[in-house]
Amino acid sequence: LLGCPQPRISKEYLSPDAYAKATAYSKAKCLFSMCLSLLVLLKDMGLLALLPWIYRRYIEGLYKSESLMLAAYYLIETLADVPGSLYYDFIIERAHGFNNKTLQTFVKDTVLSAVLGTALTFIVGSVSVMFIKSSLQYFYVYWWLFLCFVQLCLVIIVPNYISPLYNTFTPLPDGPLKTSVEELAKRAGFCISKILVMDGSRRSGHSNAYFTGLGKMKKIVFYDTIINQLSMDEVLGVLCHELGHWSHGHTYFLMLFGFSAIFLALYAFSKLIVLYGDAAASLQLIYLLYLSGGVFLPFTLLKNLLVRAMERQADRFAVRMQYGPALRSGLIKLSLENKPAPVNDPVYSTLHYSHPPLDERLALIDEEMNK
């Protein structure tokens, strides 16, 4: 990004002006991320030092004090994130043509997320503290089963009850696109209950399409931006890629992978808890949440590698379904609209990106179409 010449392959789809804009956007995000990481480190160091005092001074002795401490910690973290989010949305995103939020929408989203997150933290925290304080030899197993149950519940609750609090979802109108989506889903063996359009443009110029739900209650959701930015065939090509994830069972595999990571983290927690045996259970949990970064790091790296392989599988699926050209042109248009980093260091990309860079995806699609 620092003065790198434009890669040859990107000249196919990025004009010099588009390359310059994508580079400027990536530089701004990178600099912001570096500065924010330093500020978060300083904030965490100060907060860790203050947490015992906050607990003893304001919370100890209250009803459900342990759960209140966890909820208070979540609320403090949420409020501490507000300045960074404000700067990112209203300075960086707006400067590069993406942010459509009003300050009123930002405040509403922040308050809603704080209320819902604090309530969920209190509930999950109450049960977690109960397991930590129990005398059960394998308390982490029961704790893990509870957290898996919560995650499965959220898979159902979030798209049906939480997401509509933030965005408006309307049925895709009857017409050629809806008919083609239904035919494509039928060809792929994908059972859908609803096809919805989300008013993503009310907040951002970024675009996406996804499916959500389990069993026969799956929904296909299009951002209104993706429908406006792509042709019908290109929308179907992007959707076919998403259906490729379902066809190969990627959603369930990643869910099981996540459950496994949580189990190992809780097992490690059960062994490390002796380090903070004299602290309140809520403080023990908070301290070990910070230490969990080391436990989850190998899983994060492995997950990135797995997801990149899954993305390639999904692209191959779209090519086999005869949507290779549509997916290819759709990805190029989405790249122009969303301005991803036009230059990617292979090592950094492997360690930090869950999706292959565009040039790798285009090369794979071309290779598959030429077979």
Image: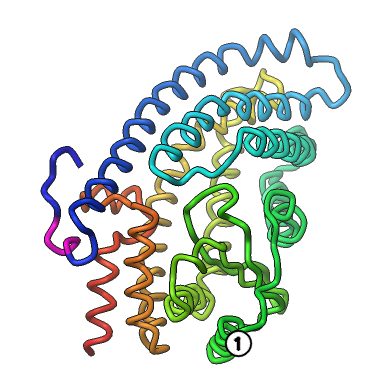
* Residue 62 in view: yes
Q: Quadrant of the C terminus?
A: bottom left
User: What range of the chain is rendered magenta?
Assistant: 7-11
Location of residue 335 with respect to 316 vertically, above or below: above
* Residue under the point 28% across and 46% down: 21
* Residue under the point 38% across and 89% down: 322
Q: Quadrant of residue 38?
A: top left
User: In the rendered view, does 192 fall on the left or right side of 32?
Assistant: right
Q: Quadrant of the N terminus?
A: top left
Location of residue 280 with respect to 261 vertically, above or below: above
Give neighbour class at mark 1: few <14, some 14-19, many 20+ (Cα, 10 Å): few
State the residue position of label 1.
179
Q: Quadrant of residue 96?
A: top left
Residue type at mark 1 is Thr
Name the element at disc 1: helix
- 130 vs 8, nearest the viewer: 8
The chief SS type of the magenta part is: helix
Q: Position of residue 272 (x, y in %)?
A: 56, 32
Q: Position of residue 145 (x, y in %)?
A: 71, 54
Would you say residue 104 sits in the magenta stretch?
no
Location of residue 83 with respect to 223 vertically, above or below: above
